[in-house]
Amino acid sequence: MVKQRIVVGLSGGVDSAVTAHLLKQQGHEVIGIFMKNWEDDDDSEYCSSNIDFVDAAAVADVLGIEIEHVNFAADYKDRVFAEFLREYQAGRTPNPDILCNAEIKFKAFLDHAMRLGADKIATGHYARVRQNPATGLHELLKGLDPSKDQSYFLHRLNQAQLSKTLFPVGELQKTEVRRIAAEIQLPNARKKDSTGICFIGERPFRDFLNRYISKEPGPIKNPKGHTIGEHVGLSFYTLGQRQGLGIGGLKVKGAQRGGGEHEPWFVARKDMEHNTLWVVQGHEHPWLLSSQLTAQDASWCAGQVPADSPLSAKTRYRQSDAPCQFQGLGAEGFALTFPQAQWAVTPGQSAVLYDGEVCLGGGVIR
């Protein structure tokens, strides 16, 4: 095996810590980098980047590797956060983790690592990369632990990025990663997985958006066109949302098809032009189901656009793959048709395509 210089993104979490350990064990020269991507309210209880850096530094100490603290906050604000706000203001629900991977972790971070003379970079993502001997192209594969697979978030990586990237924990189950961390006595072996995006952390999402997006209240209507409440601003709601509508135990005369009188309410449509939020009762209401979608801003980690053919897709992260028919629509778009209707397909989220365990790429649902 050729000894390489590998720069690992150490986040302070257990996955990236075990990643660094495994590579060091294989005899590589390993350097840790801690990425700081947000600093607007860094001292708040919600953004834990200071604690995470202390944890990452403690891991580096135990493993006997160098660690560097790098600030990408300006890049993040320009490339990820600005786009995040634009999408929300347009009434869509973006996925900043996908953008952060494409623009920061595998662009700004990769560039920085190359300046340090790295041969490769590595992160603690649950995914795998292999080179196809027949085509020479790099393939992004699902992580072997199906409950942790993160290929969905990585689908915007390109061939050059994949060729320089390693995902050692993608070959393992999460339980095994925890076991290794405990065995080598990593200080963060029991640290719980982070949820949410750094700049929001664990805080209430609406409170956060309030600081950046103006509120414009308007009517909440049911499919009969009756106004049954008031929303606080369309940007603050997402399709399929059930909590926080403020119309909980509401009785409405003539409950609609798909729901009895006391069935829960779900956000079904957002009419930006008339500033109206449409809600329906019942999880299986027809307004919540879609048999087709179109997507734009497509990106193909497979290195080429798939042929028009049967594939499978996820229209949200925590979803099992759904069979679909793929149809390319010119330069940057595609359409998908699903034999079985999909629930709450949400503009702004990503539709990501798979051929078995191989992630092909995806686009932003319109």
Image: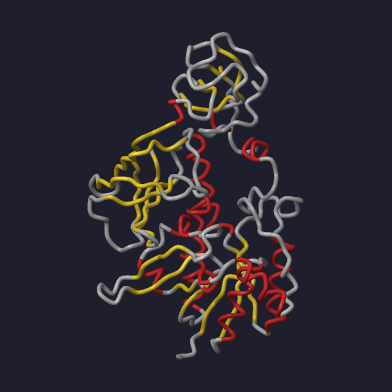
Q: Quadrant of residue 302?
A: bottom left
Instruction: Answer left or right for 333 relative to 59.
Output: left
Q: Residue at x 45, y 90 (%)?
A: 2
Residue 301 lies, with reference to residue 178, above or below; the image says above
Colour scheme employed for the rendering of this structure: secondary structure
**As rendered, which of 301 and 282 lies closer to the eye?**
282
Q: Quadrant of residue 293?
A: top left
Q: Residue at x 53, y 33 (%)?
A: 240
Percent across and percent down for residue 101 are 49, 59
**As rendered, which of 258 and 265 lies closer to the eye?**
258
Total label count? 0
Name the outermost residue toward the top.
253
Q: Residue at x 35, y 74 (%)?
A: 131
Instruction: Answer left or right for 333 relative to 107.
Output: left
Instruction: Answer left or right for 323 relative to 266.
Output: left
Percent across and percent down for residue 176 are 62, 71
**As rendered, which of 232 and 342 lies closer to the eye?**
342
Q: Residue at x 51, y 84 (%)?
A: 5
Q: Quadrant of the C terminus?
A: top left
Residue 7 lies, with reference to residue 224, above or below; the image says below
Percent across and percent down for residue 137 are 30, 71
Percent across and percent down for residue 363 are 37, 48
